[in-house]
Structures are given as structure tokens and as C-alpha cells.
Amino acid sequence: MSTSHALSLIPVFCVAFAIVTYLTRDREKSDFENQASLPPGPRPLPVVGNVIGFKTDEPWATYTEWSVIYGDILYSRFLGQEIIVISSEELAKALLERRSSNYSDRPFNPVMEPFGLTYSSAFMHYGNRWRLHRRLFHQVMRAEAVLEYRPLQLRKARQLLIDLLDTPEDYVAHLATYSNSIVMDVVYGYEAKPRNDPVISVVERSMEMFVKVVTLQKAAIVGSFPFLLSLPSWLPGASLKREAISTRRLSEDMIGVPFRYVQQSLASGNAKPSMVANALQKFSGRDESGYFEQAIKESSGTAFGASSETSSSTMLVFILAMINNPRVQERAQAEIDSVVGADRLPNFEDRSSMPFVDAVLRETLRWHPVLPLGVPHAATDSDVFEGYFIPRGATILPNAWAMSRNEEKYPGPEEFRPERFLSPDGELNDDTVSFAFGFGRRICVGRYLADASIWSAVVSMLAVFKFAKPLDDMGREVEIDVQWSTGITSHPVPFPCRIIPRVATMSAKTLGQMTNISDSAPLRGELR
Ligand code: HEM
């Protein structure tokens, strides 16, 4: 058979396979199903499910539109996948927190194994292996532990300012370097080079693939048409197979390269305290099977991935918001100037005196949640919730996008208004936008680290720079046509902007004098 003939049969195979999958799919009916009906939702097409009107590049927007029609608990189907979308924060808490024993699993994702992503703690099934990962994170990322990283965060923020001063046009790379270098230090004790660090670039390439691969659509397609991964990789049209092969290679490097760096540093007696070094020492001599070593390797690899995309995306959203809201930017700068003065940069002791800056950070998390559909949970068992039947194994999507657009809680939700987080007397209110970090037992383990790293970058950038729209040939400001990336995370696609020092004579030397942190400041205590 010729290659072109073989190719022409692929769609036929796909449809035939989908029909067989659909007809033979067998969801166990439980007693619950006889008592309650599935939540309302758009009528699915046979086989393919709810594809009509579904915006694949903005699934959160589709689910939010559907939630207006069908309510805050809705049912939808994509190929063989049953999806329950929760669009209210209260209902998400009631389900994912108060019933967390049943809703802390992740959906089976057929993409993970062939793409070499089973290492990820964030997509791992609920169970003992996940618990061990969580414990390893907890050692170094719980609220009290992250206080130790403050000197590191301030030092890296100063480096970020120097980089922005030097080459403002590379701001996207500088933001990525900032968040990546903090997590590399915390997790591996690795001091990344300010530019073109070889280890960081391995991890960045791997993450780029990761966010494109871990989407609901891809999971459903691979789940329904697994033979696509068996096609010879040379075959035109076998792009999925080729993508799987390169993602697998990148993932191996991503978790292997920095891990070997720590092993070698420990062997030569030069290891700095870090999540990996501490844990390897703790389990040394009592890990014959290599079980703990594997968990340390996998969880540390996850930490990097989970942090890099989310933190730098949030900072991109912040810059965009500042450019489009100059009055907000000026008010935050006035607050910083009044607390800090002109001779030094802000530090963590100043934080409680600058509620407006914190309100800007919260509004950034709300205005464009970088994980608009969170990370999917799964129902371990069938259940009835709010009178609706939730099938065993269903994917549960906490629709952070819809929560951020709740008109009652956030009037004028498309506008960037930090004041919504302040009481009339200027104090911060209780709304910490916690939905941006997820729910229940799977809530983001890195949230305290993320909060301090993003605050330190945001306050430092506001103290030193003005962010403004680009200029045209006539010197007039031009509006930015913002595009948003799509995948499991979403952030503004790099846009032109001006990053101008607020003091024209600002230099790297002045920045050094404005920070009272020593470059060799001890960052953590002894190895435990
Ligand atoms: C702005 C920054 C960040 C945001 C918005 C964010 C958000 C999230 C969200 C929504 C989840 C899913 C929670 C759920 O399943 O309900 C999550 C999980 C996770 N995050 Fe973050 N995150 C951020 C930064 C970080 C950082 C800095 C780290 C680590 C260094 C991190 C590590 C993780 C891990 C390991 C998980 C998986 C938890 C599990 O499945 O048990 N994140 N994050």
C-alpha cells in the first residue's frame, strides 16, 4: 500500500475507532445515578461530545459562557471524557475542600506515559507516592520555611533590575530568569548564570512543550485514538508520535541534569543546602530500592516546571496591567516612595506598610488567572453533590476564570481595580484570591514561595521603572494589541513596551548601593 493511500485511511480509522470507543464505553452505573441526574450542560453530539461552539484556544471562555446558561455546576463531554465544570468559588470549596477525600485525584491522562511526564507530582494520582512528594515539598515550601529565602529573593530582584536597565527589550527573558533562578536555588542549590544558563535553558525548553501537551483536548484525543502514537514517526501526519519522542527526551533532561548536579556537589562536599541535597542526605543509607531517590528527583523536577511558567506569566500580566493603567502604577509608586524614600530599595519589612502594592498583586492574580481552569481534579468515586450526580472518574474543572469574573464579588471584572482589595480605610481585606492557587489537598504547594517572589519583583520594578506603551514614528503612544497564549497556562504573548528608569541617572552601581544585602548572604541554615 502506498504512503498516500495509508494516509487517506487515517481519518476513516479515527472515526471508526471513536465510534467503537463510544459504543463500547462502559461507565459503571451506581446507586447514586438512579437517585440524581447529571448536572445540566449543552447537548453533546454523538461520539465527539460538546465540540460545537467550543473555543479550543480559550476553553475557559467557553465554559464561562456555558455557566451563564447552565449554572455553576455543568456537565460536558469531550470524546470519551466526562467533565464537570465548577464556576463558583463557594461550590469549588464545598466540593474540593470539604469533600477532599473524594476529589483529590487527578484524571487519568493517557498523554503522560508516552510523553514521559509521569514524574510530575502535579498530575500524579492521589496516593502514597503523591503524599511522599508533597512531604518533600512541604519541608522547604511551607509558610515558615520560605521566610529563609527572602535575602535570595531580594538579591535576585536586584539582578532583575540590573538586567532590565541593561536590555529592557529582553524583559520576558529577564522575568523568566528571575523566577527560574530562585526556584533553582531553593530546589537544587544551583546558582544560575544571569543569562543563557545551560541548565535553565534545558528546563525552559521542556516546560514549553509541557504546557502545550497537558491540555484536555490532547488527553481526549490520545485517549480515544491511542494508535496515533503507534504510527511510525517518519510517517507524514505522525506529528503526535514525534512530539511524544521529543517531549520524553526533554523531560528526562529536565529532571536528570539538575539532579546530577546536586549528586556531584554532595560527592565533592560542595553542596549548598537545598530541597534535593537535604532530602538526599536525610534518606541516605535507608533507600536500597531507590524509591526515595526517585521521588526526590521527580518532585524537584516538578517544582521547577510548576513554578517557572506560572510565576513569570503572572509578572507579564502585571506589566501589561501597569502599562494600561498608568494611574494605578503612579499610586503604587507614590506609596513606595512615601514608605521607602529615594535612597534604598523596598524590602520585606516594608510590605505591611504598602497595602496598595499588595492590592495590585492580588488584582494581577484575579484579572487574568494564569491557570484559568486550575489543574483538573478527578472524582475517586461516584457522588451526589447539590442534587447532581457526579460520575466516578469524572474530570472536575475549577473554573478560575469564571470565579475571577464574578460580577457580584468583582464589579466591572474586566477592569484592573486594586481598590477592590482595600477597605474604606485603606487596609487590605480578607480576599487573597486564593482560587488562583487551587483547592483542597492539591492546593499549590509553592504558593508562599510564589507570593514572596512575585511581590519582591513587583515592588522592586515599581520602585525603579515606569512601564509605558510603545511609541510610533511620530512619538505618540500606541495601543498594544494583546494576544494571549493558550495551553494549561495562559499569559500575554510578548508585547512591545517601554521600561524607563524613573530616575534618569539610575545605574547598576546605584542599584547596588540601594540594596543592603550582601551577595554572599547565607540563605538557609545547615543541611538538616
Ligand atoms: C503565581 C504563581 C503560581 C500559581 C498561580 C500557581 C497555581 C497553582 C494551581 C492552580 C495549582 C493546582 C491546584 C489544584 O489542583 O487545585 C498548582 C499546583 C501546584 N503548584 Fe503552583 N502555582 C504557582 C507557583 C508555584 C510555585 C512557585 C511552585 C513551586 C516552586 C508551585 C508548585 C506547585 C505544585 C508542585 C503543584 C501540584 C500540587 C499537587 O498536585 O499536589 N507552584 N499551582
Image (tube, grey):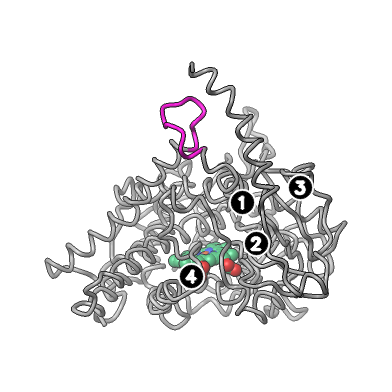
Which residue is denoted by mark 2 in the rendering?
395
Dominant SS of magenta comes to loop
Which residue is denoted by mark 4 in the rendering?
446
- From which residue to which does the magenta span run? 228-240
Disc 2 on helix, strand or loop?
strand
Q: Residues within 10 Å of mark 2 (few under 14, many from 20)?
A: many
Which residue is denoted by mark 3 in the rendering?
50
Mark 4 Cβ and ligand 1 under 8 Å apart: yes
Which residue is denoted by mark 1 in the rendering?
216
Instruction: Estimate the x, y position of residue 100 in percent, counting from the top left.
Output: 62, 78
Disc 4 on helix, strand or loop?
loop
Dot 2 and dot 1 residues touching (CB under 8 Å): yes
Q: Earlier in the sequence, mark 3 or mark 4?
A: 3
Instruction: Estimate the x, y position of residue 82 in percent, counting from the top left.
Output: 69, 57
In front: mark 2 or mark 4? 2
Disc 1 on helix, strand or loop?
helix
